[in-house]
Amino acid sequence: MTIGDDVFIGAGAIVMPGVTVGKGSIVGAHSVVTKDVPAYSVVAGNPARIIGSSSEYFSKRSEELEAAERFEEGYTLHGGITAEMKEEMLRRLISVGGFGYVR
């Protein structure tokens, strides 16, 4: 399995052995990726199929992304998130409708 740079893989998604997910791609939550994903594609489903491009996705959601809460890497497991930080993250996400991301 090879995962390119700047790839987002949704929660619960499975990427099968030997599959390449190209740079800048988005894999939908709970998708099962059985074939290579071209760069800058959005895939979803079981089996995952191309449903668009990442540029289309970001164009459609630019307002949502601008309004979203942003968190630093410290708010990840790798970054050492604490229980207090998780509570703060939850409060902030609730205040903006539940949408946010880690920079």
Image (cartoon, rainbow, N blue to C red):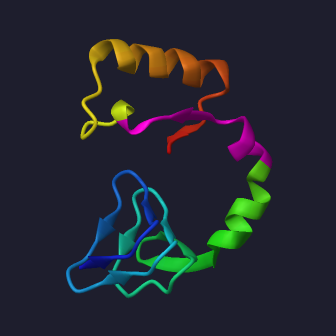
Determine the image quadrant of residue 74. top left
Residue extent of the magenta highlight: 63-73
**83 falls in the magenta region:** no
Q: Give how far across and how far down residue 29 sits, in percent.
A: 44, 56
78 left or right, relative to 96: left
Q: On the rendered image, what quadrant is the N terminus found in?
A: bottom left
Seen at 41% across and 77% down, the residue is 47
Determine the image quadrant of residue 60. bottom right
Q: Give how far across and how far down residue 6 sits, in percent.
A: 46, 66
Seen at 39% across and 87% down, the residue is 36
Q: Give how far across and how far down residue 61 sits, in percent.
A: 74, 53
**71 falls in the magenta region:** yes
Instruction: Work out whether 68 lies above or below 23.
Output: above
Q: Give how far across and how far down residue 94 sits, in percent.
A: 59, 20
Instruction: Work out whether 30 lies above or below 49.
Output: above
Seen at 38% across and 76% down, the residue is 4
Viewer-proximal residue among 23 and 51: 23
Instruction: Work out whether 59 lies above or below 40.
Output: above
